[in-house]
Image (cartoon, rainbow, N blue to C red):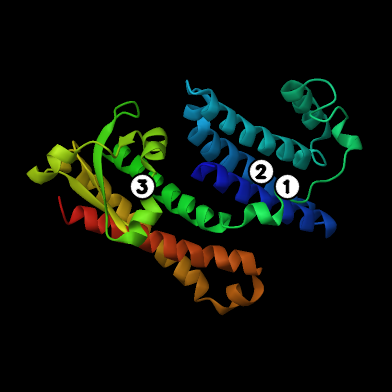
Amino acid sequence: VELEDRWILARLDRVLREVTRAFDAYEFALAVKAIYGFCWNELCDWYLESVKERLRSGDPLVRAEATRTLSFVMDRTIRMIHPVMPHLSEELAVQVWGDGGPDGRLIALDTWHEQGLPEVALAGFAESEARFARLQALVTRLRGLRQSADVKPRVSIAAQLSFDGPAGEATWSGVDGLLRVLANVDATAGVGDAASGAGIALPVEGATLTLFGLDPEVLRPRLEADAKTARAEAKRAEGKLGNEKFTSRAPDEIVQEERDKVTRFTREAEQLDAVLAQL
């Protein structure tokens, strides 16, 4: 099972549990928010983009594995949205599986699936979830660099991925295909350019990704602006966390979101500063 498959299955299991708890507590707004976040941000935005090359593969075994995982996730997702969008979910079931859905009956007459997979099948998926989250952060940064350098989405960027040690290799080994699909960065290229020192090194957790063919003079002003914005966002979140009224009255998940913002924007500013220091 590929990294993106393990990630989406772990995310599916989490959202199903979250939605089940929300429905049981009659917190329908929280349930809808969780469903929307999973369907739009994770299933459509990340997983479908990650798996589309495998779905078009000339190898029938590769296509079959990708199709099997996608079919399972679609089945659970359509059932999950049924309580809030019953007519749409029944129509989707017909469009995907034909009359009667995957098991020959209306979703309205079926049982609620709280879990995506049995616990035994999810063993070890937490690490895959963390690995894919780091990959998402890297891809987001790469997309930002492409935009800052005025590199069109269809133009491939040559790169070289070097590991800092066994931990870095365990985290980033095998992500070449996903970097190519999600960011159009060819991490297997650029080896011959490494000795020239013409590359821009992007530090990531446990590794360094050296990018080639980016114009430093075009990058500098935009990266400086991005770094300034990241520092401002981190400072804004720190200000909210320093407000006792906010931390004492806001729900725990909202407070945690601000903590996560401090971590994310601080790391983003540090990465941008590291790139700027090379230009």
Mark 3 closeness class: few <14, some 14–19, many ≥20 residues within 10 Å: some
Instruction: Please name the residue that numbered disc 1 is placed on.
Output: 32
Residue kind at label 1, given as amino acid type: Val
Residue 232 in percent (x, y) is at 38, 61
Vertical comparison of 268 with 117: above or below: below
Q: Is residue 62 left or right of residue 275?
A: right
Residue kind at label 2, given as amino acid type: Tyr
Q: Which residue is drawn at 53% across and 53% down?
A: 129
Mark 1 closeness class: few <14, some 14–19, many ≥20 residues within 10 Å: some
Q: How many labels does the image show?
A: 3
Vertical comparison of 53 with 210: above or below: above
Q: Is residue 94 left or right of residue 162?
A: right
Counting residues from the start of the chain, the first of labels 3 and 1 encountered is 1
Q: Residue at x 56, y 47 (%)?
A: 6
Callout 2 secondary element: helix
Counting residues from the start of the chain, the first of labels 2 and 3 encountered is 2
Label 1 to label 2, Cα distance in Å?
6 Å
Residue 240 in percent (x, y) is at 51, 70
Whether label 2 touches label 3, CB < 8 Å: no
> Can the viewer see residue 206?
yes
Residue 12 in percent (x, y) is at 65, 47
Instruction: Please name the residue that numbered disc 3 is placed on.
Output: 141
> Can the viewer see residue 231?
no
Instruction: Please name the residue that numbered disc 2 is placed on.
Output: 36
The extreme front residue here reads 61
Label 3 to label 1, Cα distance in Å?
29 Å
Q: Is residue 247 left or right of residue 101?
A: left
Relative depth, front residue between 233 and 39: 39
Relative depth, front residue between 184 and 61: 61
Whether label 1 touches label 2, CB < 8 Å: yes
The extreme right residue here reads 109
> Which quadrant: the N terminus?
top right
